[in-house]
């Protein structure tokens, strides 16, 4: 695969600084902030006390900060960056923390394809979800020499093919549960790091193994559906379409695992979906083609 790069204009960037920045975040979010250093970022979410999704973000070290600084950057959904600032300030209380919205000065670039692991630039880190997603660069003017200029649509087609969700397109604030959105498989939850908001519900769901829905990549035969269209099987609703790649004929759909039995998945009489179990998936998916087996055969 040719090395490709594109700015993601729909992303925003926050800076969380101050002596208690990491301690503050550690008590709130689903992942371990202590793992963040100059070369490693983490993917995490902020949940409601009921364990439902509110915000997700990539956390990386602030390379422009002073030596020894605990400041971090949050690469987040740009349309909801201001709401995330408000929510973090709500939890700040008297913590010695500063929260700044730097979305007007910092940009996010996604880079994927051959030789992506050899890239070493300021503000660059491997996408912590799965290696195939490549790297992300947070900088005032991100650039990669030798990369083919791509578009945000190319990036979204890449992630849809891999079965990787995007909060702005696939998650519903105050409704989605993180394990249904494959947060654990995307390395977005650390159940060993200590408490976080919504931990009790999330841990109980994992412990009981009762994740009833999953965000699943599907190939489309027929007309490519629109987001939020219903998925039917044997006359019963079994899911909802979210991200759509019209060019590649693929979608991400939130599907009821207990209702998948190999029967056709239909949008209408002219459109069917074939679900694929992604190479990273640890869960069972009845009636789906296994991308891992396909990769071995090819």
Image (tube, rainbow, N blue to C red):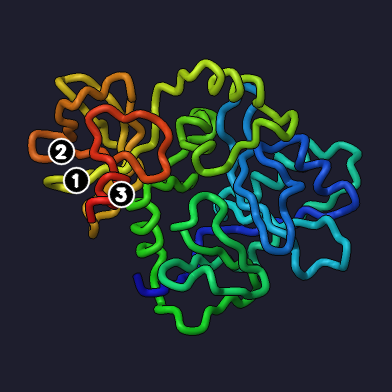
Residue at position x 65%, y 50% in the image: 82
Residue at position x 52%, y 38% in the image: 183
Q: Which residue is mark 3?
A: 244
Compared with residue 249, is residue 285 higher up or lower down, i.e. above or below?
above
Residue 238, position as x, y percentages in the image: 27, 24
266 sits left or right of 135 in the view:
left
238 or 4: which is nearer to us? 4
Q: Nearer the viewer, mark 2 or mark 3?
A: 2
Residue 68, position as x, y percentages in the image: 88, 62
In terms of sequence position, does the residue under pointer 1 or pointer 2 come before the other?
1
Residue at position x 73%, y 63% in the image: 38
44 sits left or right of 71 in the view:
left
Q: Report how far apart the C-alphas of labels 3 and 1 lie in the structure.
A: 10 Å
Residue at position x 62%, y 32% in the image: 47
Neighbour tally class for label 3: few under 14, some 14-19, many 20 plus, Cα within 10 Å: many
Residue 19, position as x, y percentages in the image: 90, 51
Compared with residue 119, is residue 296 higher up or lower down, i.e. above or below?
above
Q: Are marks 1 and 2 in contact (CB under 8 Å)?
A: yes
Residue 248, position as x, y percentages in the image: 24, 57
Check residue 220 in the rendering and tell me which mark sits there, or answer none.
1
Check residue 272 in the rendering and tell me which mark sits there, or answer none.
2
Q: Report how far apart the C-alphas of labels 2 and 3 lie in the structure.
A: 14 Å
76 or 164: which is nearer to us? 164
Neighbour tally class for label 2: few under 14, some 14-19, many 20 plus, Cα within 10 Å: many
Neighbour tally class for label 1: few under 14, some 14-19, many 20 plus, Cα within 10 Å: many
């Amino acid at each position: 695969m040719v090395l490709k790069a594109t700015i993601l204009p729909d992303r925003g960037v926050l800076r969380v600084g101050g002596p208690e920045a990491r301690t503050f975040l550690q008590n709130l979010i689903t992942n371990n902030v202590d793992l963040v250093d100059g070369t490693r970022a983490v993917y995490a979410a902020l949940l409601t006390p009921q364990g439902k999704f509110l915000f997700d973000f990539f956390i990386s070290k602030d390379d422009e900060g002073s030596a020894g600084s605990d400041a971090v950057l949050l690469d987040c959904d740009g349309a909801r960056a201001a709401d995330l600032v408000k929510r973090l300030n709500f939890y700040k209380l008297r913590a010695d923390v500063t929260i700044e919205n730097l979305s007007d000065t910092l940009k996010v670039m996604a880079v994927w394809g051959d030789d992506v692991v050899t890239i070493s630039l300021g503000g660059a880190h491997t996408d912590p979800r799965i290696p195939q997603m490549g790297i992300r660069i947070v900088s005032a003017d991100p650039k990669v020499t030798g990369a083919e200029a791509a578009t945000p649509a190319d990036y979204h087609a890449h992630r849809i093919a891999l079965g990787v969700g995007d909060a702005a397109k696939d998650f519903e604030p105050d409704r989605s549960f993180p394990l249904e959105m494959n947060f654990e498989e995307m390395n977005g939850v650390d159940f060993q790091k200590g408490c976080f908001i919504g931990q009790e519900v999330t841990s109980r769901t994992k412990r009981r193994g009762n994740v009833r829905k999953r965000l699943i990549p599907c190939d489309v035969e027929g007309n490519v559906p629109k987001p939020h269209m219903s998925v039917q099987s044997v006359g019963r609703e079994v899911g909802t379409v979210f991200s759509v790649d019209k060019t590649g004929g693929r979608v991400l759909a939130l599907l009821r695992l207990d209702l998948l039995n190999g029967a056709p998945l239909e949008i209408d009489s002219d459109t069917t979906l074939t679900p694929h179990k992604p190479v990273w998936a640890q869960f069972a998916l009845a009636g789906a083609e296994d991308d891992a087996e396909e990769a071995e055969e090819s």
